[in-house]
Amino acid sequence: MSRIITREQLLQLMNALRAGGSLVGVPVRADNGDAFYQYFDGQVEPLIAPTVFPVTTIKEFFFPKTETLYTFKREGASVTVSDAVPFTKPQVIFCARPCEAAAIPIIDPLFAWDYQDRFYQSRREMTTIVTLACAAPDKNCFCTSVGLSPDTTNGADAVLLSVDNDTFEVRCLTEKGEKLFDGKTTESDKTGSFGQNPPIQFDAAELRERLQKTFASPLYADEPSVRCVGCGACAFVCPTCHCFDMVDTGSVNDGRKVRNWDSCQFKMFTHHASGHNPRRDQGERQRQRVQHKFVIYPEKFDHILCTGCGNCTRSCICELGILPVLKVIAK
């Protein structure tokens, strides 16, 4: 027997959690038709649909675009530094794409490596993730090429699979998932399903070996790399990209240290004060992005820094993203 829940029951659960003080993250539809994640406010209807491709990612619920780390205040010769308070509210993310949930355990080691990032870790500890298995992967999806699938359970506490448009099978995977859906489901002989696997575009092991041998390849000075304009959209919609910068804001007497998202595709990312830039052109910056995701990060953390979500290609104004580059390298 399986456990099922209706669309109406899911909405009731979201409202109950919100009323109880929890933050509830859901995909919603913007006025321009795009989908994006935000906290549920009870006003905008959540998108409970297995065919949605949000232009943002659930990474923002763990690693915000901008975040205060500490504040400082000077009075005469005395300076008072106050740490920002870590995340304390429980939060539940509903209807996340499986490829996005899979990104969270991939970046977990980074925030607990040479430094314990309590801001990220507090959010991670307080969060429950419920995914909705994909029903219709599009041409940009390549999760199967990096060892995942439309119903992958990596990083999820529970997964929903569509039985029909208004009914979902619930599969709880962790204690958090069990606690969330305890008493909220009914037994049924119905089971949910997911869409077809996207075709495998390359062999990840072979690709890594080839990348290790082709660092100086002229590929990065030719198509498709030269199409990149360095806007950074690929990094900002990627569920695993994590580059950041830290800046002081405010005044010398009253300010704060802030962490902001950054991107290795920006020219200024490696620009030295001397004027020298070790990554001189966009081709070299593209090489860094590919090498980091498929060689450098796996060597350090034993994870490919990509879930095949396709977000970068969907959001690229040059119709690039990482998949077209990988396909050229694979050939």
Image (cartoon, rainbow, N blue to C red):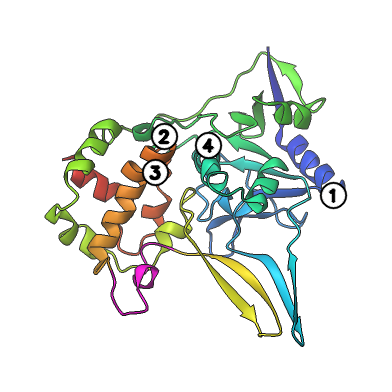
Closer mark to the observer between disc 4 and disc 3? 3
- Give the class, few, some or many, for how many residues have Cα within 10 Å of label 4's Cα (few <14, many ≥20): many
Q: Earlier in the sequence, mark 4 or mark 2?
A: 4
Q: Residue 201's x, y, as percent?
A: 27, 36
Q: Nearer the viewer, residue 143 or 264?
A: 264
User: Label 4, label 1: how many angstroms apart (C-alpha)?
Assistant: 26 Å
User: Label 4, label 2: how many angstroms apart (C-alpha)?
Assistant: 20 Å
Kind of residue sitting beneath label 3: Tyr
Q: Is residue 196 left or right of residue 280?
A: right
The magenta-colored residue range is 263-277
Kind of residue sitting beneath label 4: Pro
User: Label 4, label 3: how many angstroms apart (C-alpha)?
Assistant: 21 Å
- Give the class, few, some or many, for how many residues have Cα within 10 Å of label 3's Cα (few <14, many ≥20): some
User: Label 2, label 1: how many angstroms apart (C-alpha)?
Assistant: 37 Å
In the picture, the disc for residue 98 is 4
Closer mark to the observer between disc 4 and disc 2? 2
- Taking the magenta stretch, the answer to whether it contains residue 228 is no
Q: Quadrant of residue 141?
A: top left
Q: Which residue is mark 2?
A: 302
For the question of whether residue 222 can be seen, the reply is yes
Q: Element type at marker 2? A: loop
Q: Residue 43's x, y, as percent?
A: 76, 57
Q: Earlier in the sequence, mark 2 or mark 3?
A: 3
Q: Earlier in the sequence, mark 2 or mark 1?
A: 1
Q: Is residue 192 left or right of residue 86?
A: left
Q: Earlier in the sequence, mark 4 or mark 3?
A: 4
Q: Which residue is mark 1?
A: 21
